[in-house]
Structure formats: structure tokens, C-alpha cells
Amino acid sequence: MKIVVCIRQGLDGEILYMVRPALAGSVVAKIKSITTPAMATVRTTQKDTSDILVGVGFGAKEHLDKVKAFAKKIGGDLTATRKMVDNDYLPYNLQVGLTGKTVAPAVYIAVGVSGAVHHIVGMERAGTVIAINPDKDAPIFDYADYGIISNIEDMGF
């Protein structure tokens, strides 16, 4: 028996399907269970202290103090991408994504977040997603309700 850790699961008739990141987190795959009994483990969503989360991506590393001040000003809590944690800009307990926590705030503001799948799976349950990134082709805009194509310097943080 193989147990798969997934981000979602569902039934199609009597067949269990599991949804999980694949190919090093670059895609999300829908996997059909062919074993009996079919089993899967689903990650749970962590309740945060704030309805507003400000996610800091590697693109905002040079402006971390400004982003922290912005989060405080709007009453939000800070979160981080894996790359920010791996490069020691922020602690692991702030990491959102496949190897971090899963969150579901009312508002998620992604600042300098590229939109890698392994981060998206951790914040995809957010109510409203606002992305700020100077790269108009950044994948985060595919998930955002509102997108701002801008440098942090021009945002007035």
C-alpha cells in the first residue's frame, strides 16, 4: 500500500483522486488511486492570527524592512516563500507552501513572489490575492485577483 501526501482529494464515482505537486513542484498533478484500500493524507490549513497576510518573496529581499513596516501598518502578518527562508532572510515558521504551512486568510498580498507552484499550494485558499511584482509575466498573476506590475520603490511602502 502506498500513502500519498496531497493538497486535495476527491471522488469521481468510486475512484479516489489525489491532487499533489509533482516535478519538483513545477506542476500540480491529479493522481488516480489504483490500490485497495485507497488512502491519502491531506495537509490541513493553519488558522492565522490575522485576516491579512503579506507574503514576501525573494524579489522583495532588498526591501524587507519596508515590507515588514507595510504589513504592520495595515494590521497584517508576514509570511515568506521557501527561497526567503532558505536564504536566511526570514524564519521557517513564516514559510508558506508545500514545505511550509498552508494558510487561508481573507486577503493575501504577495510582494515580490514569483508564483512557484510549491508556494501557491500553501496560499491558494486565500479569499482575495493581490500580487505586486515588476515582472508582468510572473506566474503569481495567474492566481491573483488583483495584480500590480511595479517595483517596490514605486509603491510608497
Image: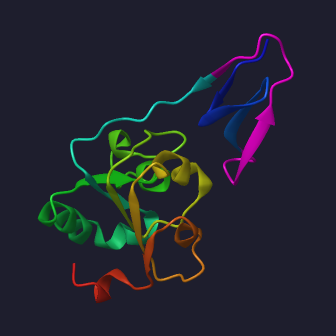
**Residue located 70% across and 17% down the image:** 39
Residue 31 magenta-drawn? Answer: yes
**Image quadrant containing the C terminus:** bottom left
The quadrant of the picture occupied by the N terminus is top right
Q: Residue at x 21, y 56 (%)?
A: 76
Numbered disc total: 0
**Vertical side of 85 occupied by 34: above or below:** above
Q: Position of residue 133 (x, y in %)?
A: 45, 77
Residue drawn at x 42%, y 35% as measured from the top left: 45
Residue extent of the magenta highlight: 22-40
Please state if 147 lies on the left or on the right of 138 as rendered. Answer: left
Name the spot of residue 109 as percent of width and height, x first. 35, 64
Q: Is residue 32 left or right of residue 113?
A: right
Q: Residue furthest bottom?
A: 154
Location of residue 59 with respect to 47 vertically, above or below: below
Compared with residue 138, is residue 113 higher up or lower down, i.e. above or below? above
Residue 57's x, y, as percent? 43, 63
Q: Is residue 55 left or right of residue 34?
A: left
Q: Residue at x 79, y 23 (%)?
A: 14
Q: Quadrant of residue 92?
A: top left
Q: Is residue 32 magenta?
A: yes
Percent of width and height locating residue 22: 73, 44
| Most distant residue in the front direction | 13
Quarter occupied by residue 94: top left
Query: Farthest residue in the right direction?
Result: 34
Viewer-closest of 147 and 67 = 147
Question: Left or right of 96: which side holds 106?
Answer: left
